[in-house]
Amino acid sequence: MRLRALGLVCGLIAAVSFTNTGCARYWDCGDEGDRPAGLTRQDMVGTYRADPFGTLTLKSDGTFEVSDWPEFDYPNDPKHTDWAAAGTWALQPERKTSGMRDDLELSFTGNRYWNSDFSKWQSDFTFDVTGKRQKPRLYRFTTDPDVCELHTLRHD
């Protein structure tokens, strides 16, 4: 009986700690849906636009260009940076996981941006992919995933 009560108390402490640190919200937010089955690199080629601004063009040779790129860490008041850059992109192998999958990776050439907590410069950026093969949609969580705010780029 005493061992069972101790187990119950430990379980309650763990559950309260887990939810109070914000970790539980990662699963409550969900995502925008699964990656389209059979998605190929060729399916991703095209121009994507964010709302209210930001354009990403993925080219078939594995390069990309961005223009009017927003500061993605302000969901309620996106900052307009008027930043343009280029680099290479890669569609990552499909993973059977929920939450953040980092399906598409952008590697900026010669340009870097501050990471979400402004502690260091980064030269890569990732998005999850959802939608349909004919019209994929890119998204990523703003700042911390437990905020449950997403930035989305839609295929033209």
Image (tube, rainbow, N blue to C red):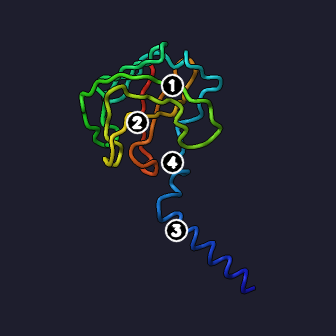
Q: Nearer the viewer, mark 3 or mark 4?
A: 3
Q: Which mark is residue 17?
A: 3
User: What residue lies at 60% left-to-right and 27% top-to-bottom?
Assistant: 36
Q: Which mark is residue 151?
A: 2
**Looking at the image, how many numbered discs can be counted on the residues?**
4
The residue carrying pointer 2 sits among few (fewer than 14), some (14 to 19) or many (20 or more) residues within 10 Å by Cα, namely some
Q: Is residue 138 visible?
A: yes
Please say if the residues under marks 2 and 1 sit with CB atoms less than 8 Å apart. no
At label 2, the amino acid type is: His
State how far apart marks 4 and 2 are (Cα): 14 Å
Q: Nearer the viewer, mark 3 or mark 2?
A: 3
**Mark earlier in primary sequence (3, 4):** 3
Q: Which residue is mark 4?
A: 29
Left or right placement of residue 140 versus residue 113 in this view: right
Q: Nearer the viewer, mark 2 or mark 1?
A: 1
Please say if the residues under marks 1 and 4 sit with CB atoms less than 8 Å apart. no
State how far apart marks 3 and 4 are (Cα): 19 Å
Q: Which residue is mark 1?
A: 90
At label 3, the amino acid type is: Ser
Q: Secondary structure at mark 4?
A: helix
**Identity of the residue furthest to the bottom in this view:** 2
Residue 78 place in picture, x, y as percent: 29, 38
